[in-house]
Image (cartoon, coloured by chain):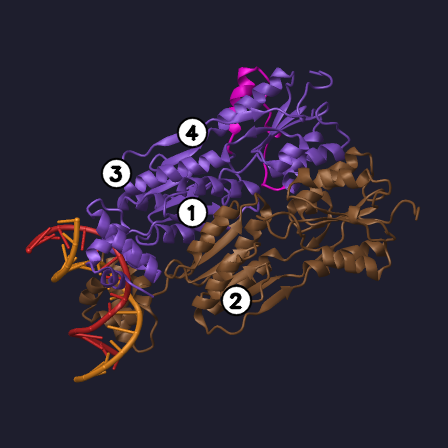
Chain colours: A purple, B brown, C orange, D red
Amino acid sequence: LPTIHDVARAAGVGIGTVSRVLNRSELVSAATRQRVLDAIERLGYSPSPIARAFGRRRTDKLDVLIPAYAQAFLVEILRGIEAALVDTDCTLLVRAIVDADDRDRAFEACCVKGRADGALLVWMPASDSLARRVVEEHFPVLLLNGSDERLWSVGVDHDAAAERAVTYCMGLGHRRIALIDRPADPFGAPISGICRDGYLRALKHGDAPVRDEYQRIAALTPDAGAAATRELLQLSEPPTAVIVASEAQAIGALDAARRDGRRVPSELSVVGYNDNDVARFLGLTTVSVPLRDLGRLAAEQLLALVTGAQAQPQSTYLPTQLTVRRTCGPPLAERA
Amino acid sequence: LPTIHDVARAAGVGIGTVSRVLNRSELVSAATRQRVLDAIERLGYSPSPIARAFGRRRTDKLDVLIPAYAQAFLVEILRGIEAALVDTDCTLLVRAIVDADDRDRAFEACCVKGRADGALLVWMPASDSLARRVVEEHFPVLLLNGSDERLWSVGVDHDAAAERAVTYCMGLGHRRIALIDRPADPFGAPISGICRDGYLRALKHGDAPVRDEYQRIAALTPDAGAAATRELLQLSEPPTAVIVASEAQAIGALDAARRDGRRVPSELSVVGYNDNDVARFLGLTTVSVPLRDLGRLAAEQLLALVTGAQAQPQSTYLPTQLTVRRTCGPPLAERA
DNA sequence: TTGTAGGCGTTATCAG
DNA sequence: CTGATAACGCCTACAA
């Protein structure tokens, strides 16, 4: 395999010149540049990425830690990230996180200098020790859909989204509105959800009843969504509408309603979350989360952190959008 | 940041010894090793991955090229790959491929020496030029669900799977069996599918009629699956069963049948492909493809190629399994 | 505008 | 068993 020395010899120049050509420095005469380019072409030379990283003390790699949900939204995010990296020679070190142990191991490794130039934590909260190390060592880390005052982050305002969804349902005439939330920490106990506050805010603002039994946190599977929906429907006063914090859960909710003999939307309105082709296909009214934009913005910001100076951590929120399709409508009868 | 020299000084040994300790060489006395370990601990030293790669002339990275289908099976495969890499210090350079241009660019880059130690092409055929380069340069490349005589590959026998599915349907009494196939090349024209031969074999073997209009190739979306199903149902002699080559398409097929007023399975039996929680949840009878095992095996074999000697290219096929649930049954009436 | 020399942090080799 | 030393291939001053 040819090295930079071979190219230099072949072109009759020094290695410095070759290096300058490689790195698009302006300080090379057109003629010399052409000779070098020819030599490179002739020898089939391409610079060794490892040696390059070694010399530059930079890897041109971004660590991506992402929950191993077997779901489509992950891929959408990845696409967005890669979109930001097109015409950059930066590549992605992806690690799909399965559980808490796995996550902690990944956290341990991800800010070892020399592994990657920065890390992107997708849809998972940073551990306390990670946050501390990051701040200490000034390692570029960005949370995509997570928030931590000490760290940079990009996300959507789940509370605002939930608020809008609830308000929309109230506008249709619903008063008994339930929430099937998703766990805030995918690897922790399901103690807090991502959009409960917004849900509560909307209910209070609209003077609708707030009931504990209308609030559920479920795993990101159709089964869990179906189970939670069944429980809601078996209440003495079942909800007439339900906000569901993911697509997978929403599929389960739709099916549970159907099996229970409830028509959607007349007997139960359902608002989903995210937006994929299955949702579109099922006519699911959803909160559309701009996954690809999130990915792109996150990667762009992280890249800026890697190259530029570290300012104060900053949080950016992208707007969500309510996509109205066919699973929401006015409640059949107002018993309240 | 401490280097190996700092550790050596702190431990009162030479860097060679530290290196040996780091690399678990046996040629270090217990006492010396302990002193080195202590020094490492005390200084908080960890070896620079870049320098290490430079010295070893090996990156400990595997390139993974994977189609950017926004679907769950991708993640399952990734999980399998990562499972094989646990307790290896190998990491994954993932690239989600969007289209043919993208793929070709990735092919161009992926076997540049020094980027990664090997490449895994998931669910996409290698280009001719890639195959040639791989053979020439002895670069370790493995196809996961693809086949090329010149390259190593791991996959499942789609034809055998289709054959089994068709045979199963015939066993239930079906004679008019259709196929909604998936394109063999995700980025090429949809001219050939992945399991048509097996489908045909089973039909011929069972003396069932073979009709061109029963064979369709559709994109991997619910919409495409639904459209193909609608067309099938509008035939003057519509099929009573349909084999669908993906989950996403199968969801569309189920819905199209329902909208057309056909009961599943009594009026239309549906066999899906792959197996995820949505399929499980919907009660879809499917060909279960061992995605995680595929990923694991592929990574294991690739790792072997990277470290060991290159033998002749070899293809391994993993068995699929027919998972019987609720979308297949005897046809309602035999008109034939 | 160009060439040269030094350094980057390991691993590997080879004497001792 | 251990220590010194030579690569490794590039980048980046600095000198010309």
Residue to which mark 2 is pinned? B301
Label 3 SS: loop
Q: Position of residue D5 (x, y in %)?
A: 17, 73
Please, which chain is the residue tagged with disc 3 on?
A
- Mark 4 or mark 3, which has the lower sequence index? 3
Q: CA distance from mark 3 to mark 1?
A: 21 Å
Please, which chain is the residue tagged with disc 1 on?
A
Residue to which mark 4 is pinned? A317
Label 1 SS: strand
The front one of B229 and B93 is B229
Q: Quadrant of residue C6?
A: bottom left
The front one of A316 and B11 is A316
Residue found at the far front of this picture? A31
Q: Quadrant of residue B261?
A: top right
Q: Is residue A216 magenta?
A: yes
Q: Residue at x 78, y 49 (%)?
A: B212
Magenta region: A194-221
Q: Is residue B138 visible?
A: no
Residue to which mark 3 is pinned? A309
Query: Image quadrant for the C terminus of chain A?
Result: top right
Residue type, numbered disc 2: Gln
Labelled pair 2, 3 in contact (Cβ < 8 Å): no
Assess disc 3: are there few (<14), some (14-19) or many (≥20) residues with their C-alpha within 10 Å of its C-alpha. Answer: few
Residue type, numbered disc 3: Ala
Residue to which mark 1 is pinned? A64
Q: Is residue A277 left or right of residue A255?
A: left
